Image (spheres, rainbow, N blue to C red):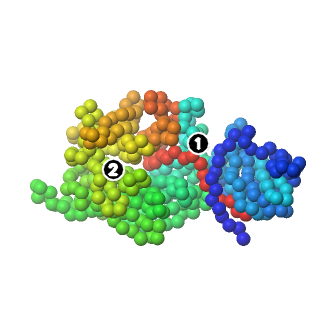
Amino acid sequence: MRSHRFLPFLLLGLGGCHAPGEAVHAGLDVAVRVQVSVEQDPTVAMSLWANWETPEPGVSWVEYRVEGEASQETSSTEVGTVHRVQLLGLPPDLPVKITVHTSGDDGDYVGDAIAITGSAPSDLPEFTLSVSKPSLMDASRFALTTTMSPSGAWIQIIDRLGRPVWYHGGAGCFFGDAKFDVARGEFVIHSQSAEGSSILRIDLTAPNERFLLPTKSIHHAVAVLPDGAVAYISEEARPWTFADGTDEVVFGDTVFELSADGSTRQLFSTWDWGEPQIYGMRDGIYGAAVDWTHANALSYLPDTDTLLLSLRNPAVVLEIGRDDGVVVAEYGGTGDDWGFAADTEPFSHQHGVVMTPAGTLLMMSTPVSQDGQLGSASVAIEYALDEARHELVEVWRHGDESDIQTVAHGGVARLPQGNTLVNWGDPIVLIREVQLTSEAVWEVEVRNAAELDMSLHAVVPFSGFTMPVED
């Protein structure tokens, strides 16, 4: 019987790998040659499977490389005689040199093969590389992207040349948000269709959708929680009578938690937080209504067991206790909790709000005039939290010189080595990695995005894969 075990995907230099035919155990002079067969994965054409058998049991691993590029190596498998290992992180339509290894108590085995990766789907968005300064770039090898157009949506992982190495989606799909659950090797996705919206999980190594929760009113964002649960935003429409006597249906927002056992509970509602204001009208799941809070970003903060919720229209970011739903901090807005320092520009029409590991707020912000018109330049902006004054202090920004407007979506991510990944979302599908000096060190773009009416919903730095090994 074959069993699955999830193992980390590693990037190694050639100097750290065993050469074909080299003995890997003391006292053994030569590894025995074995025959290797290779097949394309049926769902992700660039992924390959290496298959071989050995007469004696042993642990196995695979080295593989595209000509002229760095070698990659899988982790060791469990002991067995029938070996099947998936090779991920490969671009399309290129030959790959593959060397398999098995090492056991009774001997060592090695085999070689060359295979060509499959082609990407013809309608997969094509990213073009325009800036690349490898010595200044973060070590993250990939970026997870979520793009959407009227014809469909795609989640894809691209490498540093802008080439796809993994994908899921196509015509008829709509993915509002995608997060990666590192602990489980799965994507958590908000999916929308004509019938309603759903939360689903997709296994990275076998991308079959597994629906968790079909519901009508999910929108914008999900957050992965540490115990297998998922938090999500849901529209909540209620009738409201305004001070001038006008009766309207108003869209607020609610945050729910979907537990690993399938049960749900309400964590927070904007109806318990504030009084509705009119920022305009929009069509939603209940028809046309007053657009009040327009929640558009949600993330989990493990150090405090809280959730960060962005309310776009009132230009407020709330930090909410996961256990009790109590607002523990209110950043921005007109309240008296966390305001702005005297020389700091307030954020507005914000997207992609996150808390960095250093405890700063990072987001995309677009100026809004008093008559509600968006400014021409959206910026990535970072605020430090001045605990003594309870004020937000601007400490970094990027984008003024680019003069690119983000109408919707867009976001930022602080990378492990200090650079920042910025995307402008809609109407320009552009991803840029910048240093704190604002120097661009990496940039890719879907150049026909306007023609396709395409928007970029999410970009997440992605260091590597988990992969199944069958023995």
Does residue 67 appear in the picture of this structure? Answer: no
Q: Identity of the amino acid at label 2?
A: Ser
Q: CA distance from mark 2 to mark 1?
A: 29 Å
* Residue that numbered label 1 is attached to: 141
Identify the residue at horizontal 58%, vertical 42% (top origin).
Answer: 141
Total numbered labels: 2
Q: Is residue 351 left or right of residue 270?
A: right
Comes first in the chain, label 2 or label 1: 1
Establish if 375 lies above or below 300. Answer: above
- Marks 2 & 1, CB-CB < 8 Å contact: no
Quarter location, residue 359: top left
Look at the image and tell me in which quarter the N terminus lies: bottom right
Q: Identity of the amino acid at label 1?
A: Arg
In the rendered image, residue 44, in percent from the top left (x then y), is placed at 63, 55
Does residue 455 appear in the picture of this structure? Answer: yes
Q: 295 or 217, which lies in front?
A: 295
- What numbered label is drawn on residue 244? none
Q: Is residue 38 left or right of residue 174?
A: right
* Residue that numbered label 2 is attached to: 310
In the rendered image, residue 360, in percent from the top left (x then y), is placed at 38, 41
Identify the residue at horizontal 74%, vertical 39% (top origin).
Answer: 15
Look at the image and tell me in which quarter the C terminus lies: bottom right
Establish if 251 lies above or below 211. Answer: above
